[in-house]
Image: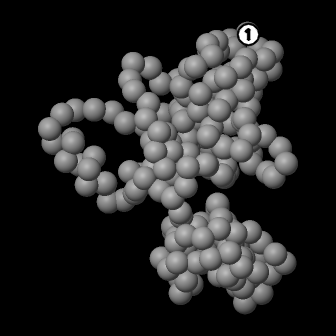
Amino acid sequence: MEAKPLESPPTFVDQLVVPGDVVLDLSSMANQTIKIGGGLRQDCDAISVMKAGNLRFSKPNKYWVESSQKRYAPCVGDTILGIVVDTKADNFLVDIKGPALAFLPVLAFEGGTRRNIPKFEVGTLLHVRIVKANAGMNPELSCTDATGKTAEFGPLRDGYMFESSTGLSRMLLSSPTCPVLEALGKKLSFEIAVGLNGR
């Protein structure tokens, strides 16, 4: 059987939820697939909340709990800004403002081979994507999109990096465009890279 996207989000969407709330019952959702993001977990046939915040939904089928916090909780698919803190033979160790350092394999770049390994100094700011994030292990990063292309990922140069809460980062990335960025764009031209980890 082919899985179908959700037809309509549950009534909890855009409402405040707290740990323990059950927001989805999978037993009543035959032939539908969902993706769960930060702040949610699956217990058998129930999707329950792990942290307080607002339940969010994006089409076709992704759910997450949005809250404002200083410490970032890594989630697969998030685009973030990380700082290289160490280099090893097979990977770079990157600070992502999370509970543990993440690692970026030297081959996780477009056209990455053993012959053309990128060289980053300690302190280099990178725009990366999280490809693995499991409890009990360091997150794995990539400098390519899902198709293997560089897209907007890689080192960021000649600019300033500011730290913020994760809630502010999500607001800056929201659609429609954040009013602050829109007003700033009318006065001067700029480029911005916002990481969901509060950088």
Picture quarter containing residue 139? Answer: top right
Instruction: Give the vertical position of 8 relative to 3 (above or below).
Output: below
The answer to whether residue 148 is visible is: no
x then y, percent, for residue 24: 67, 82
Q: Residue at x 74, y 40 (%)?
A: 100
Which residue is at the far bottom?
Answer: 28
x then y, percent, for residue 192: 37, 36
Q: Nearer the viewer, residue 8 or 82?
A: 82
Q: Residue at x 65, y 68 (%)?
A: 51
x then y, percent, for residue 55: 55, 73
Picture quarter containing residue 186? Answer: top left
Circle 1: is it few (<14), some (14-19), or many (20+) Cα within 10 Å? few
65 lies left or right of 184: right
Q: Nearer the viewer, residue 163 or 190?
A: 163
Which residue is at the far front?
Answer: 70
- The residue that label 1 is drawn on is 115
The answer to whether residue 135 is visible is: yes
Q: Amino acid at mark 1?
A: Arg
Q: Nearer the viewer, residue 141 or 28?
A: 141
x then y, percent, for residue 110: 62, 26
Q: Secondary structure at mark 1?
A: loop
